[in-house]
Image: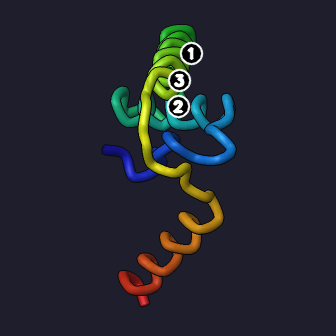
Amino acid sequence: MCRNIKTLYNFDPPATEEEIKAAALQYVRKLSGFNVPSKANEESFQRAIDEIALSSQKLLESLVTQAEPRNREVEIEKARERAKKRFG
């Protein structure tokens, strides 16, 4: 999985449309191998991003859990601590 794609499910507040679109962009970049597509592939690239973002939004809306929503600030701090241990 691409390291830049973050978990978006079960956060309070829920993931925004921009966050979902950013994850879709990262996924399409990883899958295609293009950071920026050529003019010939630009339409296909954008269509894939839009379709994946829509599917991702539907998925996030349909998932159910009994767990308490996670706090973004707490998760960011946990990630900082993991990075500190890993990289010093």
> Which disc, if any, is residue 25?
2
Q: Position of residue 28 (x, y in %)?
A: 43, 28
- Judging depth in this view, the residue of 80 and 65 nearest the camera is 65
**What residue does disc 3 label?**
61
- Judging depth in this view, the residue of 6 and 78 nearest the camera is 78
| Badge 3 element | helix
Left or right: 11 as drawn, with respect to 13:
left
Left or right: 69 as drawn, with respect to 5:
right
Q: Are marks 1 and 3 in contact (CB under 8 Å)?
A: no
Q: Mark yes or no: residue 20 visible.
A: yes
Disc 2 from disc 1: Cα separation: 9 Å
Give me the residue at 42% from left, 77% from top.
Answer: 82
Give me the residue at 34% from left, 29% from top.
Answer: 31
Give the class, few, some or many, for how many residues have Cα within 10 Å of label 1's Cα (few <14, many ≥20). some
Q: Position of residue 53 (x, y in %)?
A: 53, 22
- The amino acid pointed to by label 2 is Leu
Q: Are marks 2 and 3 in contact (CB under 8 Å)?
A: no
| Badge 2 element | helix
- The amino acid pointed to by label 3 is Glu
**What residue does disc 1 label?**
50
The mark closer to the camera, 2 or 3, is 3
Left or right: 53 as drawn, with respect to 73:
left
Give the class, few, some or many, for how many residues have Cα within 10 Å of label 2's Cα (few <14, many ≥20). many
The mark closer to the camera, 1 or 3, is 3
State the quadrant of the C terminus: bottom left
| Badge 1 element | helix
Give me the residue at 36% from left, 81% from top.
Answer: 86
Q: Position of residue 68 (x, y in %)?
A: 51, 51
